[in-house]
Amino acid sequence: MKIFVAGATGAIGQQLVPQLVQAGHQVHGMTHSAAKEQLVRELGAEPVLADALNADQVAEAVGRVQPDVIVHQLTSIGPLDFRHFDRGFAMTNRLRTEGTDHLLSAGQAIGVKRFVAQSFFAAYERVGGPVKTEDDSFGVGPAKEMRQTVAAICHVEERVLAATWTEGIVLRYGGFYGPGTSLGPDGEQTEAVRGRKFPVVGNGAGVWSFIHIADAAEATVAAIDHGRGGVYNVVDDEPAQVAEWLPVLARTLGAKKPMHVPRFVARLLTGEIGAVMMTELRGASNAKAKRELGWSPSHPTWREGFAGLTTPHPVGQEVR
C-alpha cells in the first residue's frame, strides 16, 4: 500500500517508517522542515515537504501522493513542566486540532481508505477499576493544567471516528520510553529520576501503562494492515502503580531511591496534574489490540524494557 506518514521524523515516526518500508509498503513521509528531508530518505521514505498547519499545503501534498492510508503522528512537545502542562503542549494541541482537520479534509478529497491517528491512554476517567479498556470513557474533569491537552486528544478521536468515508483507527499509546523519547537513555524524565527529582507522591497509587517506542511502531504497522476501525490501546502487558515502577526504574538506572512527598506538597510544586498522575491515573488493557491486530509487544513489560535505558542512544524529538 501507499502510506502517507505525517510526523515521519518524530520519535515514533523514525521507528515506524523503516518498519513500514520493510513490510513492503511505499512510504511518503511528511516533514515541515527542508533540513529533515534527507532524514526521511535515510529512513527509507520519499520526503514530502508541507506545514501541517497550512491547509493548502497539506491538501496539495496528499493530493500529489494519492495514498491509500494516512498515518497521523504529528506532535511537537516542549520541555515538560507540570505546572504549565498545556503550555508545553500548545503546538502539539494545534497539530491535534487544526492538523487533524487538515489531514482529514485532504484524505476525504482523495478518498483515502484508512486513517490512523495517535492518541494517549492517560485521559481515561479516574474512577472505577485500575485498568481501563477501549469501552471505558475519558474523564470529564481532567486536571486543570492539562484541560487543553485532553480536549485536543478528544478532538482527534472524535473527528477520526466520525469520518464515515474512511476506516478511522485511533491508537491510544501508553507512555513512550526508549530512544528519542523523554524516557530514553538520556531523556528528560530519565535524568529527573537519576537526579531524584521525580518523587513518589502520596501513596503512589496512580497506574501507568508504558510502551516501548519500537513496540508502538510495530502495533501501528499491525493496525494499518489488520485494524478494523475504532480504538485500540497500545500498551504493554503490565500496568503498574507509580510506587512499584518508579523505584525499579531508579534502581535500574543506578540512581538513589526516589523521594516520597505528600500529595499536598506535590500540588504546591506541580499543580493538580502532578498529584493526579501520581495518585489517581488509570492504566489500560492491551487485550483488544493483541486479539484483533495479532500483535504482542516485544517488550512485554516495562521491567525488562527499562533495562535498555542504560544503553546510550541518539536522542531525537517528536516534531512535525
Image (tube, grey):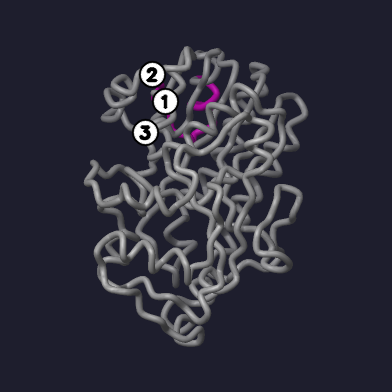
Name the secondary structure under disc 2: loop
In the rendered image, which residue does mark 1 sit on? Answer: 17
| Mark 3 crowdedness (10 Å alpha carbons): few <14, some 14-19, many ≥20 | many
Residue 264: horizontal and vertical position, in percent? Answer: 50, 87
Quadrant where the C terminus is found in the figure: top left
| Mark 1 crowdedness (10 Å alpha carbons): few <14, some 14-19, many ≥20 | many
What residue is rendered at 51% in x and 39% in y?
Answer: 297
As drawn, 315 above or below 140: above
Q: Which residues are magenta?
A: 46-60
What residue is rendered at 42% in x and 33% in y?
Answer: 13
As drawn, 142 above or below 91: below
Q: Nearer the viewer, mark 1 or mark 3?
A: 1
Q: Is residue 246 visible?
A: yes
What residue is rendered at 36% in x and 71% in y?
Answer: 198
Name the secondary structure under disc 1: helix
| Mark 2 crowdedness (10 Å alpha carbons): few <14, some 14-19, many ≥20 | many
Q: CB under 8 Å between callouts 2 and 3?
A: no
Q: Is residue 53 visible?
A: no
In the rendered image, which residue does mark 3 sit on? Answer: 9
Q: Earlier in the sequence, mark 1 or mark 2?
A: 1
